[in-house]
Image (cartoon, rainbow, N blue to C red):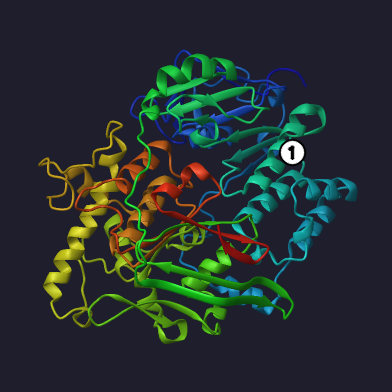
Amino acid sequence: MRGPLIHIPKNSAIYALGAANKRSKPLFETKDVSWTVNSKDSWALIGKAKNNVFQTLLGHTRVSPTPAHSLYPRYKDVDAFSRLKFVSFRHSGGNGEFYDYTARYGAMRDGDDKTLGQSFEEIAQELTIPRSHQDALIRQLGLEQLLDVPLIALSNGQTRRARIARAIFRQPEVLLLDEPLTGLDVESRERLLQLLESFRASPDNSPHVLSSYRLQEIVDLTHHTLQDIAPAFVSHVLYLEGDRFWAGPRDEFFGDFAPKHLQAELATKPWSTQSTTSKTALVADLQGVNVIYRGERKVLSQISWQIHQGDRWQLKGANGSGKTTLLSLITGDHPQSYTQPHLLLPSASADGAPKLQHRKRIPTPTLRSSIGIVSPELFDAFPRKEPGMTVWDAVQTGFGGGFVPAKEGVGKIHVDSWESSDVEKLREWRTSRCWDVLEALGPLAWDLPTTNEPPTSSSGDPIGNCTPNAVTRDFASRLFPSLSQGEQRLVLLMRALVGRPPLVILDEVWAGMDERMIEAVKRYFNSPSPSEAFTHDQAVVVVTHWEDEVPWTKQQGLKVFKLEKGSGSVL
């Protein structure tokens, strides 16, 4: 079959299905740019609205006027959509109801779950894939050592690679990948990029891949100069954000479009913080920690790690090195946290200051209120079917670390009498804190010009002692499930920060956020305002595979704890 693979003409408007042309605003318009994808092209999709492009390719939108030779000219006489496979790593929490994501650790202990190898065998039998092809792909993605591991026990990065492998096993002619590099360690990224490069080198026998990326995976902005760091095989770039749609060759993107339209990103000031050099009180103390499954598979071995007030840590390690397991011990979610001889975690004392106790002596609600966390597991598990749950409701669950909102109404906070001897004072503080984080990380911050100044209220006062802006109040009233993925992740970050817990864990905190949201968080983390993101008494642990996403440097007091094959050390 001849002709281009994909074609959207100039002056096209893309609408949500069911939207009327005259009365509805299009999702995006191509204006004077046409988009044509040919067999040998390798496209990178970037920009805040890139998911709308995927939705169009999946047939979930309407192109007006209808392209003369269909959206897929090469497949105009057949069902094009049956030849596609879309691999998305956005919310995957099933039907939107809360589920106990900590149950995975019990399942691993029992060892009765389907393994990765068994899941591959099922697909191979269904599609009669030659064993040699299956084994080659498994080796290319570095999955051969994981075939006997239960699916539920795979790390986030391992799960991503497994999902990509399963999609390729189904032999699609067009493979759509939504931010596949996020959450992968350096070695895994290289393996995946080599695989995608091999597809482009042999297009007649491989799927045609269109992949989206975060801006920082394509453009290096860290040194205030625009540098091309896109994967070598990328030949074309599509950019979609706001009302700006652009598509063309890679050299034109970096030579003309990016210098003209991405300059605002170059003005971002570097991260900064006040480092902590003196020893302060402990907020977590792990000595000789071990995690073993089935009596033989050791995931963590003799881990010793002390986290003090004011510490700023980066937790490093390859996919499958044990990071998620270690964090689940610290949050008390792992069953084996109860059996560790020396695992001391934060617990509120009578005066409100943190004190250390063994996990089995700390009630789970107390521990959850003492540790603020953002993680892929929490994002997937957070309930989206709770009737009427607003952004305000979701944020205030951070005070207790629970998942069921009080639903007192926007601007109102429920406080139980046993929580404080001065209920009204605590209620006032919690209300102020909710507005603080909503002003700092809400829509006002996304539209601010690139600056190092913190957001202000409608009265012009710095956040922390202000009346909430009307835009912020409207955002607080929105239903949580109606938000975009990036907005939901921001709200869950607000939830982790709002109670000022002694320990904050930021696990892949940037995943799913667009560039403007990321910059808003950076400004907040860097803000010297009265409502700064972290106090000097709070400890923070950041987990990321991208060094430029770490908020602090070693010169600013950053410490690094690295896991490798289950063993840990301070670098």
Secondary structure under badge 1?
helix
x and y percentages locating residue 476 in the rendered image = 25, 52
- Compared to residue 414, the image places residue 470 above or below, namely above
Residue 183 as seen in the image, left or right of residue 283: right
x and y percentages locating residue 545 in the rendered image = 56, 49
- Tell me the quadrant of the picture where the C terminus can be found: bottom right
- Compared to residue 147, the image places residue 508 above or below, namely above
Residue 438 as seen in the image, left or right of residue 238: left
Residue most extreme to the bottom: 361
The amino acid beneath tag 1 is Leu
**Disc 1 designates what residue?**
195
Residue most extreme to the left: 459
The residue lying at 52 percent from left, 51 percent from top is 544
Q: Kindly indicate the quadrant of the structure image that contains residue 502.
A: bottom left
The residue lying at 22 percent from left, 46 percent from top is 472
- Compared to residue 403, the image places residue 261 above or below, namely above
x and y percentages locating residue 128 in the rendered image = 86, 50
Query: Which of 15 and 283 lies nearest the eye of the viewer?
Result: 283
Query: Which of 178 and 332 lies nearest the eye of the viewer?
Result: 332
The residue lying at 75 percent from left, 18 percent from top is 2
Query: Which of 170 and 180 lies nearest the eye of the viewer?
Result: 180
Numbered circles on residues, count: 1
10 Å neighbourhood of mark 1: few (<14), some, or many (≥20)? Answer: some
The residue lying at 58 percent from left, 33 percent from top is 57
Q: Is residue 551 visible?
A: no
x and y percentages locating residue 12 in the rendered image = 48, 19
Residue most extreme to the front: 278
- Tell me the quadrant of the picture where the N terminus can be found: top right
Q: Is residue 69 visible?
A: yes
Residue 67 as seen in the image, left or right of residue 121: left
